[in-house]
Image (cartoon, coloured by chain):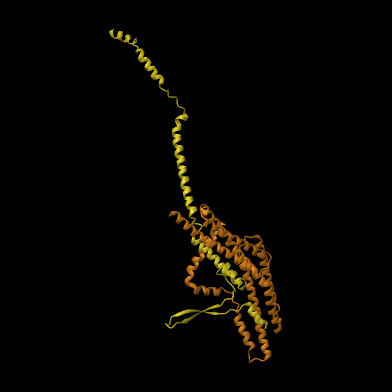
Chain colours: A orange, B yellow
Amino acid sequence: MIKKLISFSFLTTTLLLGSFFLGDTSKTRAIEEAEAQVFCGFNEKLAELIKVQTDKEADSLQKIKNELVVRKELLNLIIDCSVKEAELLKTKLESVKIDDKEVAEVKEKTLSEIDRAIDYYEDQTLGIKDLGLQGSKLLAKKILDWRSSNYSVLVGQTVNIITWNNAEDFLSVADQRFLDVSLGVSGIKEESEEVSKVLDEAKESLENARILIASSKKSILEFAPNADTIEDVKKALEELASAYKSFFEMGQVIKDETLKKIE
Amino acid sequence: MELEKILKEFKNIEPRAEFSKISRATILATTRTPKKTWAQILWPSLRFSSGALITGFLIVIIVGAFSTGINSRVPLASLDPITLKAEAEAIDIQIQLTALGYDNPLQVINDTSTPSGVSIKKVAKIIPTEIKTEEGKETTVIETEPVITIEEALEVLVK
């Protein structure tokens, strides 16, 4: 817990310092970010497709031949890009350290499914060279449908696992913060109703966050990502934000109480 | 010989009976000092040392209690606003990212884990271009070009 708190403080300090020093170099950073993107170059190839489809100089047979060539190139490009996308998803998920044993098992299962998705994409490239115009349209539809029904589930599951794990980490830090604050105010809790009230509010927010995180974990274990899962994670984070609001309020209450005693 | 005679006569000197009586009564009325044991000899210094020790211990306790009292009344370390703000802001950023949900899942994944990592999110491609301003100075203008997603490219191919 202490380690987490230290690493969390270190991370936030590094981020704050980093953002301070990078503040004036937003242009450079934007360019660096752009270079780091995996651009698939669809724009150029789609422009080429429109060009061959509307070529007035070529006869209809030549137009079909030209269009088929560009379509096949585009299909190969889409599949290459899809593989890169899946590999990126896998890398991101692999880099997440999960302490919860059950969720860690789901993470491994998701990684295996992403590997299967990469295999699926690579299988689709095998028949491209033999496709006709209609076949290229059907393959595009097949991949589109497969992505919608299968790949999107993997993306959703990865989003859920990563965001859930983050919320879990934030909850641990907030729990530790609550313990420290509770210990700190133990001497005056009995004397001050206000301190007691604010502490109870923080406790309630943390409990609500815990319930919501547990609820989203359930749907992660069921491998059924849906909008409710990430919504629960979001609500849990909002509850944690509410707990921090109480911590800030506590600081003010104690300051007021101390001033009253001095007077 | 005269001196010897005188000295011998001294042996016969006796106090007056009344003086003897008073002296005996005075001596008998005086309390006898009992013989001191080792414990009785050491006790005064022992008593002083233990007194000093107890006083020191009490001082430590009082000062300690006073310090704890201050800490419990002003738990500044756990309520340090800078640390609290940093933690609360990190949560706020995460809320905003999570709010994107499945609309832009790759951005959520990318920004959540490593803020400067690679991504295939739907963003505008940034093209830095050198242009000359009216004053003749060169400056960099960032133009954007919309990026087509895998789904959008596939939809074009389906038609």
Q: Nearer the viewer, residue A227 or B16?
A: B16
Residue A1 located left or right of residue A222: left
Q: Is residue A49 above or below residue A7?
A: below
Q: Visible in this render: residue B84? A: yes
Q: Nearer the viewer, residue A103 or A59?
A: A103
> Residue A25: x and y, percent?
48, 72
Q: Visible in this render: residue A118? A: no
Residue ID at (63%, 85%): A49
> Residue B102: x and y, percent?
62, 72
Residue placed furthest toward the left = B2
> Residue A23: x and y, percent?
48, 70
Quadrant of the snapshot with the C terminus of chain B: bottom right
Q: Nearer the viewer, residue A138 or B45?
A: B45
Q: Is residue A9 above or below residue A63?
A: above
Quadrant of the snapshot with the N terminus of chain B: top left
Residue ID at (46%, 49%): B66
| Quarter assignment of residue A242 | bottom right
Q: Nearer the viewer, residue A134 or A6?
A: A6
| Quarter assignment of residue A36 | bottom right
Number of numbered discs present?
Answer: 0
> Residue B3: x and y, percent?
29, 9
| Quarter assignment of residue B132 | bottom left
Residue A87 located left or right of residue A253: right
Residue ID at (50%, 67%): A18
